[in-house]
Image: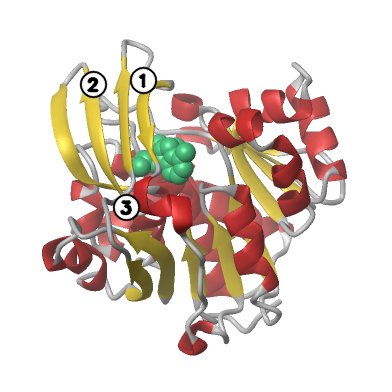
Amino acid sequence: MPEPESPLLVVGSVAFDTIKTPHGKQERILGGSATYFSLAASYFTDVRVIAVVGEDFTGAHEAVMTDRGVDTRGIQRAKGKTFHWAGEYGDNLNEAKTHLTELNVFEDFKPQVPAEFADSGFLFLANIDPVLQAQVRSSMPGVQLTGGDTMNFWIGGKRRELQETLKLVDILLVNDGEAKMLAEDNSLPRAAHKIRAMGPKAVVIKHGEYGATIFFADNKHPFRAPALPLDEVRDPTGAGDSFAGGFMGYIASQGKLDREVLKRAMFYGGVMGSFAVERFGTERLQSLTREEIEARFELFRELTHLE
Ligand code: AMP
């Protein structure tokens, strides 16, 4: 394992999202897998981002990350428009219906790892084209723990490439539908087992508002972390990436990877996911305090604790 507090590098999408939920609609607000991930992780450790944006991405957008201390020197600016995703949630807030995926500047993106980022001990391959994920992992020989994410868009569109990338991932985080699709198996434990045979040593399966389960490398019994029953979910977008940010950020802050650290990381993932969905876009993740995070962690403990 890397030293505790060795920086955490994320590669993923920085996006503009058009989102409709039963609580309203917002056009082209800042989103993207790397954005949610880095904001959530920034409460735990030093975070660095690699991504690409277009000419419509302003200094004010970038300040959302830099104000949280996120190192954005790996964000390339390209001619053209920033990645744009449009989606909608109906009454089932666990599932986004994608209306539009405009890759734009991602079409020609060649990820470059700035020299200053080469000493990152932790890497997270957030949801983007698996070919780009693999390129970044391969250019970072010093990385000692790699987390990864993906989605149905890539499982369906680039399965072969994704399988190559999975060989480079230590812990994969996916939601349950994606796990079943990737493993082509409707039983979650069997799907987790099959995914582990593809490369990852541990698999975290997210169940939206019902929590998440980690299947460990040693194949012993899995561990389930709850999700907080919230009165109101305004916008589920980014819940998965924020979970991953809390999960990886906590691991990076500890610098060791035993079962207890992983279990607490599952709780911190749930905590950050629960904050993300309380407001549209990244709003809630921009101005949290460590005290609020710890208070919610206690709520999560109480939710499941048995004397
Ligand atoms: P989630 O945490 O799963 O809700 O992810 C939400 C984020 O994923 C949104 O902010 C989108 O911009 C981003 N996203 C959606 N589709 C893709 C895709 N195909 N590649 C990369 N990022 C995506």
Which residue is at the front of the view, 1 or 306?
A: 1
- Where residue 85 is drawn, which disc sits there? none
Point out residue 110 in the picture as x, y percentages from the top left corner: 51, 65
> Is the distance from the Cβ of mark 3 to the nearest ligand 1 atom less than 8 Å?
no
In which quadrant will I find the N terminus? bottom right
Q: For marks 2 and 3, give the one nearer the viewer.
A: 2
- Tell me if residue 13 can be seen: no
Q: Residue at x 58, y 67 (%)?
A: 123
- Where residue 93 is drawn, which disc sits there? 1
Point out residue 152 in the picture as x, y percentages from the top left corner: 57, 29
Point out residue 294 in the picture as x, y percentages from the top left corner: 35, 57
Point out residue 149 in the picture as x, y percentages from the top left corner: 58, 46
Q: Residue at x 34, y 56 (%)?
A: 35
Q: Secondary structure at mark 1?
A: loop
- Where residue 295 is drawn, which disc sits there? 3
Q: Label 1 sits on what residue type?
A: Leu
Task: Kindly indicate whether the residue at mark 2 contacts the one at mark 1 (C-beta within 8 angstroms).
Answer: yes
Residue 224, by quadrant, is: top right
Q: Label 3 sits on what residue type?
A: Ala
Q: Earlier in the sequence, mark 2 or mark 3?
A: 2
Q: For marks 1 and 3, give the one nearer the viewer.
A: 1
Q: Secondary structure at mark 2?
A: strand
Which residue is at the front of the view, 104 or 261?
A: 104
Distance, label 1 to label 3, CA atoms, is: 25 Å
Q: Is residue 197 above or below residue 67?
A: above
Q: What residue does disc 2 label?
A: 21
Q: Earlier in the sequence, mark 1 or mark 2?
A: 2
